[in-house]
Amino acid sequence: MESENVIFFEPYPFRIGQKINIKAGPRRGDWLVIDVSDRKVKFRCPVSLREFEWDLFCYFVEEKTVAEWPHRH
């Protein structure tokens, strides 16, 4: 049997208070995690202060220390 390359994805285990940046897509930008359930995550935009609750969708890419958050675009 020939071996195959397989990519595995796992949902990211959000924690309340995390500051995140989504790099692409319609939800891209900086967000503050304000609530988490088994199926949903609620974010607040640190600029507009608008809040959104979405089904869990993010996958961990990398974690790094940044000089500025939220980013000034």
Image: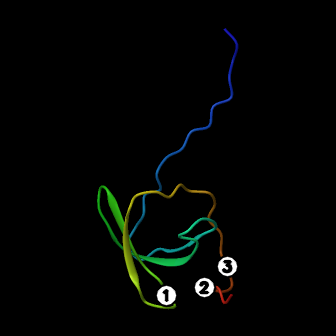
Q: Give the colour scheme of this rendering.
A: rainbow
Instruction: Name the residue at 65% across, 69% down.
Output: 64
As helix, strand or loop, the secondary structure at mark 1 comes to loop
Q: CA distance from mark 1 to mark 2?
A: 9 Å
Q: Which residue is mark 2?
A: 69
* Image quadrant containing the C terminus: bottom right
In the displayed structure, 25 sits above or below 39; it is below
Of the residues under marks 3 and 1, which one precedes in the sequence? 1
Q: Can you name the residue that lies furthest to the top here?
A: 1
As helix, strand or loop, the secondary structure at mark 3 comes to loop
Q: Position of residue 15 (x, y in %)?
A: 40, 67
Q: Which quadrant of the view contains residue 2?
A: top right
Q: Which residue is mark 1?
A: 46
Q: Which quadrant of the view contains residue 50?
A: bottom left
Residue type of the residue flagged with mark 1: Pro
**Badge 2 vs badge 3, beta-carbon distance below 8 Å:** yes
Q: Can you name the residue that lies furthest to the front here?
A: 26
Instruction: Name the residue at 67% across, 79% down.
Output: 66
Q: Position of residue 61 (x, y in %)?
A: 62, 57
Q: Which residue is mark 3?
A: 66
**Badge 1 vs badge 2, beta-carbon distance below 8 Å:** yes
**Badge 3 vs badge 1, beta-carbon distance below 8 Å:** no
* Image quadrant containing the N terminus: top right
Q: Position of residue 48 (x, y in %)?
A: 48, 91
Crowdedness near tag 1: few (<14), some (14–19) or many (≥20) residues, C-alpha within 10 Å: some
Of the residues under marks 1 and 2, which one precedes in the sequence? 1
As helix, strand or loop, the secondary structure at mark 2 comes to loop
